[in-house]
Image (cartoon, rainbow, N blue to C red):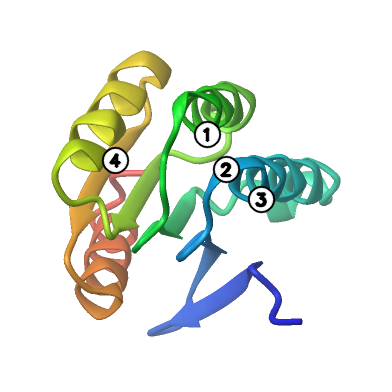
Amino acid sequence: MLERTRNIYHRGVVIWYSDYSNLKGQELVEAIRSNIKKYLARPKDEKEIGLALLNIDNAVLDRDAVEAFKRSGEQIRDFQKVVAVVGAKGMKGVIIDWVSFFTKVKIKTFHDEQTALDWLVEQKNQRII
């Protein structure tokens, strides 16, 4: 089974990657919860990466998934300062904006992972985080 959460490296910068693509219902909610548990179990210095990329392409966000994203944002907002999201088209984009507002985490949506990764590195290089 493909690991859905892991550190990735882009231009020498560490980014926490979470792949929720093509998930829906309880499977998506469990993936979100599992990701947060895995993230919070890491040593403090590894949690303080500050950058994250989420892929929600073709994921179906129901009420439970939105609540799980909101709760996860609350739990990691002290560590994750900048988040890029791929696949937030239409209503999913509105939901992501709402999660960003509620959690006070800077979240920006993108159409592809490469552009999102470049933006995250730029945020790190500009010391936004």
Residue at x 66% of width, y 42% of height: 26
Q: Is residue 46 left or right of residue 104?
A: right
User: For mark 4, what is the residue?
Assistant: 107
- Please say if 12 is above or below 46: below
Task: State the separation of the CA atoms marked 3 and 4.
Answer: 23 Å
Dots 1, 2 in contact, CB < 8 A:
yes
Mark 2 or 4, which is nearer the eye? 2
Quadrant the C terminus occupies: top left
Residue at x 71% of width, y 55% of height: 46
Dots 3, 4 in contact, CB < 8 A:
no
Quadrant the N terminus occupies: bottom right
User: For mark 1, what is the residue?
Assistant: 65
Sequence-first tag of 3 and 1:
3
Dots 2, 3 in contact, CB < 8 A:
yes
Residue at x 71% of width, y 39% of height: 33
Amino acid type at circle 4 is: Ile
Task: State the separation of the CA atoms marked 1 and 2.
Answer: 7 Å
Query: In the rendering, at what x and y percent does residue 83 appear?
Result: 37, 48
Q: Residues within 10 Å of mark 2 (few under 14, many from 20)?
A: some
- Please say if 19 is above or below 94: below
Q: Nearer the viewer, residue 43 or 40?
A: 40
User: For mark 3, what is the residue?
Assistant: 27
Sequence-first tag of 2 and 4:
2
User: Quarter-wise, where is residue 82 in the image?
Assistant: top left
User: For mark 2, what is the residue?
Assistant: 25
Dots 1, 4 in contact, CB < 8 A:
no
- Please say if 50 is above or below 69: below
Amino acid type at circle 2 is: Gly
Dots 3, 1 in contact, CB < 8 A:
no
Task: State the separation of the CA atoms marked 1 and 4.
Answer: 17 Å
Q: Is residue 127 left or right of residue 31?
A: left
Amino acid type at circle 1 is: Ala
